Image (cartoon, helix red, strand yellow):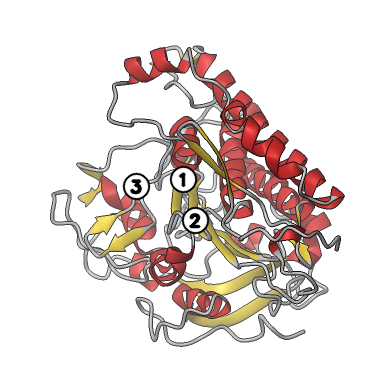
């Protein structure tokens, strides 16, 4: 580590007209000779809708370190030592429990809360506080934003979206209170400006579009502050600043490109301004926004929904024009089964890209991935059966350094998903007695 005479507070910002850009962790933010200072722990939940084609197509053969990768998980093989495969975890409260149809609504609402939601399409929605918000309420005061909720599919939050269940249940996995969901931000521009700018969200889209014509790059606005700062830093920190600001500018350019792209998603539906035309770029962009928010310590808690539960998205990038949800009701039709497997694998490819980016960012005594805990999974196991037992779950990162990934851990059947959340929150110094239907912690995550 290069020691400089300048010591920067961890929460240092580059400031300009109406803009403040937080900085990544620099050597200068660590007091001289204090090599043992630890990076903060980040916690993210990445949710995919509609379950997987079949849990046996997902779950590896063998447990421990020597497991065999399945076709769906194969894109993660180069990251074997950086994540766990967790099997045997259940979301019991996603089941009907006497309420009849509505597995998609219940799956989304209960995935992070472990609470059976009230069956209603009206305003009297009720679920439970989600694990991300339990963490946010405990550590959120340490960052500018207590949490960040992102999504890659727009949806209304009122009305009936699944057999009498409110759209609030299918659209949100994050719940601040039992009656208050946190709808994800699905527009990359608005998510970006929330983090870095001062966009007046009360303005009409047309007014914001006119103002965008005159908008400078956020980096232009903080140019003077940047020049002043870099002259005080060592070579390593100057390189980090350069790489980080380049990443921000790339994000800006990708958002601007998406806003200017007026092609239709289908012949009858116009693409909303600011949302990329392809799902691939959409997920990449939202993942990068989450990454930058973690890198700058603007927040340590985030959720990202690849799609709302019951998603009808099509995937022309991989040659699939059929809507996702109906395909999962394949009734053992080989062609449909193959298409669902390709969608599941495609999602894993995008996850692998994201994890590699996190791993490429050096931070303190490791990488941004080392200092994170990324939960990836679904609230439905087999999309055809609509069951909520033995969910498809991955956990990437090392958290506070005590997690020992690189293994398939087969939990005792019937173990609640919420037990995993209690275990992860412990790594952040948050120790609730219970989350939803939790019964304890998950063993073996910290052991080899």
Query: In the image, what residue occupies the spot 61% across and 26% down?
Result: 220
Q: Residue at x 78, y 50 (%)?
A: 233
How dense is the environment of label 2, judged by Cα within 10 Å: few (below 14), some, or many (20 and up)? Answer: many
Residue 201 picture location, percent across and down = 33, 31
As helix, strand or loop, the secondary structure at mark 2 comes to strand
Could you give the CA–CA distance between mark 2 and mark 1, rounded to whole angstroms?
A: 8 Å
Determine which of the numbered discs, if any, sits on residue 236 in the image: none
Disc 3 element: loop
User: Is there a contact, CB below 8 Å, between mark 2 and mark 3?
Assistant: no
Label 1 sits on residue: 150
Chain-order first, disc 2 or disc 1 = 1
Question: Is 257 on the left or on the right of 235, as rendered?
Answer: left
Number of labels in the image equals 3
Give the residue at x 81% y 44%: 239
Residue at which label 2 appears: 302
Residue receiving disc 3: 183
Split into 4 quadrants, where in the image is the C terminus? bottom right
What is the distance, in whole Å, between disc 2 and disc 3 at their CAs? 12 Å
Q: CA distance from mark 3 to mark 1?
A: 8 Å
Tags 2 and 1 touching, CB below 8 Å: yes
């Amino acid at each position: 580590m290069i020691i400089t005479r300048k010591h920067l507070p961890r929460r240092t910002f580059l400031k300009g007209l109406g803009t403040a850009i937080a900085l990544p962790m620099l050597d200068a933010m660590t007091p001289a000779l204090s090599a043992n200072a630890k990076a903060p722990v980040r916690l993210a939940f990445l949710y995919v809708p509609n379950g997987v084609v079949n849990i046996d197509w997902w779950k590896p053969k063998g447990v421990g370190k020597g497991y065999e990768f399945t076709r769906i998980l194969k894109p993660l093989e180069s990251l074997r030592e950086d994540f766990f495969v967790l099997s045997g975890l259940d979301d019991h409260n996603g089941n009907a429990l006497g309420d009849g149809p509505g597995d998609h609504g219940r799956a989304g609402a209960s995935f992070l809360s472990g609470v059976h939601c009230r069956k209603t399409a009206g305003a009297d929605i009720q679920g439970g506080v989600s694990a991300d918000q339990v963490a946010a309420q405990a550590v959120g005061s340490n960052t500018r934003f207590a949490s960040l909720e992102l999504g890659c599919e727009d949806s209304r939050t009122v009305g009936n979206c699944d057999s009498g269940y409110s759209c609030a249940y299918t659209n949100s996995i994050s719940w601040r209170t039992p009656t208050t969901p946190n709808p994800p931000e699905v527009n990359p521009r608005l998510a970006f400006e929330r983090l870095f700018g001062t966009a007046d969200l009360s303005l009409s889209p047309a007014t914001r579009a006119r103002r965008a014509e005159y908008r400078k790059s956020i980096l232009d606005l903080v140019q003077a502050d940047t020049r002043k700062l870099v002259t005080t830093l060592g070579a390593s920190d100057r390189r980090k600043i350069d790489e980080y600001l380049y990443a921000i500018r790339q994000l800006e350019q990708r958002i601007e490109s998406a806003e200017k792209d007026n092609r239709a998603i289908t012949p009858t539906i116009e693409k909303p301004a600011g949302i990329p035309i392809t799902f691939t770029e959409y997920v990449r962009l939202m993942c990068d926004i989450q990454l930058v928010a973690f890198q700058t310590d603007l927040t340590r808690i985030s959720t990202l929904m690849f799609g709302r539960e019951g998603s009808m998205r099509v995937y022309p990038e991989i040659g699939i024009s059929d809507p996702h949800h109906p395909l999962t009701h394949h009734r053992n039709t080989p062609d449909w089964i193959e298409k669902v497997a390709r969608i599941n694998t495609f999602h894993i490819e995008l996850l692998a890209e994201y994890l590699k980016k996190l791993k490429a960012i050096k931070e303190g005594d490791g990488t941004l991935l080392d200092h994170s805990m990324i939960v990836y999974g679904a609230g439905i196991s087999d999309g055809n059966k609509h069951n909520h037992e033995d969910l498809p779950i991955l956990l990437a990162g090392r958290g506070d350094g005590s997690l020992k990934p690189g293994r398939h851990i087969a939990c005792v059947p019937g173990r609640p998903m919420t037990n995993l959340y209690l275990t992860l929150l412990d790594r952040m110094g948050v120790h609730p007695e219970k989350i939803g239907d939790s019964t304890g912690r998950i063993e073996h995550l910290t052991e080899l």
